[in-house]
Image (cartoon, helix red, strand yellow):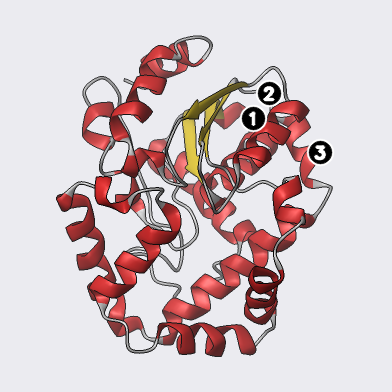
Amino acid sequence: MVHGLGGSAINWMAVGPELAKNHHPLALDLAGFGETPLHGRSAAVGANANLVHDFITKVVGEPALVMGNSMGGHIAILESADHPRWVTACVLVDAAVSGEDLRRADPVRFGALAALSIPGVGTSFLDRQLRGLDAEALTRRAFEIVCADPTRLASEVVEAHVKLTREREHLGRQNARAFVQALRSIGLRMADPRFWSRVAKVTAPTLIVHGSVDRVIPLAAARELHRHRPDWELRVIEGAGHVPMLETPDQFMEVMRTYQQPLGHSLRTAS
């Protein structure tokens, strides 16, 4: 299970225990996020895609179902396209792919993203935006962006994310550096039309899961992805935002339980 931009392995904590009843779920922190520091590495999508492949080959040690949220969904597509024999199936949760809504970004959002994309300027811009916010405020702001209704989050989910945010405070500018590197990278990759050739190369059975009111990656992007790959299943979770596995875990697990074919065999073999 691969988290998204600014996320961590605990983004899967609301569904991990339920998945573990019948399967062997493993979640990792990408470089620059969670408890995996940069240590001179890159937080760009390509570098973290390599990290995911190394994790599958060296830690899992056998082909696996790869599930990714947001940027992690984009990485799951890259892994499935570039290393097909290591991926038994793929689940894309509000995956970071381009759609018409994103290509028509509003001027305010576009200006902020442009500032973040400029080398040397992006980190300073982000520092100014977040200055003075404590761990609770940062976590609350993040959940307000990615959730349709943050009040639905379980208290233990919020507490775990606040705790991790507080633990990462000592990293200082490394937090912003990793975020900006990853944001710049995923933005460029989403805008690159060659990405669709990677989508076409995926041979693993794939499920697209998307929140109906995702404000980060609109549902239109998932529908466009489905138009490129009509053989993939698309399941929409009504009323959910960008992280349905955290915000609406029961509905998310219902999708996973009911979608038995063709993912069912892959899920069983991962037990």
Alpha carbons under labels 1 and 3: distance apart: 14 Å
Asked which quadrant contains residue 267, the reply is top left
First reached walking from the N terminus: tag 2 or tag 3: 3
Alpha carbons under labels 2 and 3: distance apart: 12 Å
Q: Nearer the viewer, residue 55 or 187?
A: 187
Are there few (<14), some (14-19), or many (20+) residues within 10 Å of tag 2? some
Circle 1 sits in a helix, a strand or a loop, which is it? helix
Q: Which of 267 and 142 is in front in this view?
A: 142
Apparent side of residue 192 relative to residue 234 in the rendered image (left or right): right
Where the C terminus falls, by quadrant?
top left
Where the N terminus falls, by quadrant?
top left
Q: Is residue 202 above or below residue 184?
A: above
Residue matched to label 1: 84
Apparent side of residue 89 relative to residue 226 in the rendered image (left or right): left
Q: Which of 71 and 98 is in front in this view?
A: 98
| Amino acid, disc 3 | Ser
1 or 2: mark nearer the eye: 2
Question: At which x and y percent is residue 151?
Answer: 26, 51
Q: Which of 94 and 205 is in front in this view?
A: 94
Question: At which x and y percent is residue 221?
Answer: 67, 41
* Disc sitting over residue 197 in the figure: 3
Alpha carbons under labels 1 and 2: distance apart: 7 Å
* Residue at figure coordinates x 70%, y 54% from the top left: 102
Question: At which x and y percent is residue 9?
Answer: 34, 51
Question: At which x and y percent is residue 109?
Answer: 64, 69
Residue matched to label 2: 203
Instruction: Check whether the beta carbons of the residues at disc 1 and disc 2 lie within 8 A of each other.
Output: yes
